[in-house]
Image (cartoon, helix red, strand yellow):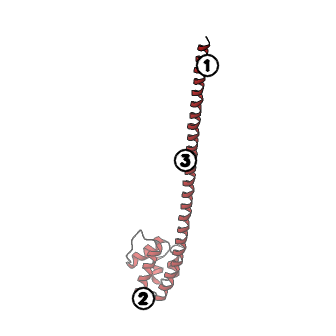
Amino acid sequence: MPFNLDKFVASPSVEELDSLKKSEIVKVAKHYGVEFQPLMRKDEIKRYVLEYLVDESILPITVLETAITVPTDNTFELKRLEIEMNKEIRLKEMEREREREEREMQKRKEKCKCKCKGKKEAREHEFRLKQLELGVIKAQTLK
């Protein structure tokens, strides 16, 4: 059922205000001259409208008390979910960092193995050269 501003103004209620979309709450706020920032969240604009309606004695003050406590529960839930999401993000970042460090460690090990292998081969080559030199010297002395 489409929103009818005139019908809401004729008999405003918290229940109907709760069921409205942000764009519809903005229309209500503009109708009553309630100041708000366009980037505000729906709940914040709705709270301003409710405060105005209570200040103008259009709605009873008890409506304001119950209407403000309900979003608080949602706020806590949203905050809990945000904290949980941040925790998961940090865990994933830590896991990626650990994996990156493992890869770096593996690269260092491979590099060290190559250096050690190269040194070993160089020593073996040097040893063979010495053997050849000794063989040549021995052959010359035998002649």
> Vertical placement of 6 versus 40: above or below?
below
- Quadrant including the C terminus: top right
Give the x, y percent position of residue 34.
38, 78
Compute the Cα span from label 2 to label 1: 115 Å
Give the x, y percent position of residue 64.
47, 84
Q: Residue at x 59, y 14 (%)?
A: 141
Name which of mark 2 and mark 1 comes first in the sequence.
2
> Vertical placement of 35 versus 107: above or below?
below
Q: Is residue 60 visible?
A: no
Which label number is shown at residue 135? 1
Compute the Cα span from label 1 to label 3: 46 Å
Residue position marked by numbered label 2 in the rendering: 57
> Vertical placement of 48 versus 90: above or below?
below
Residue position marked by numbered label 3 in the rendering: 104
Name which of mark 3 and mark 2 comes first in the sequence.
2
Front-lying residue, 125 or 34 = 125
Front-lying residue, 5 or 126 = 126
Q: Residue 136, located in which quarter of the rendered image?
A: top right
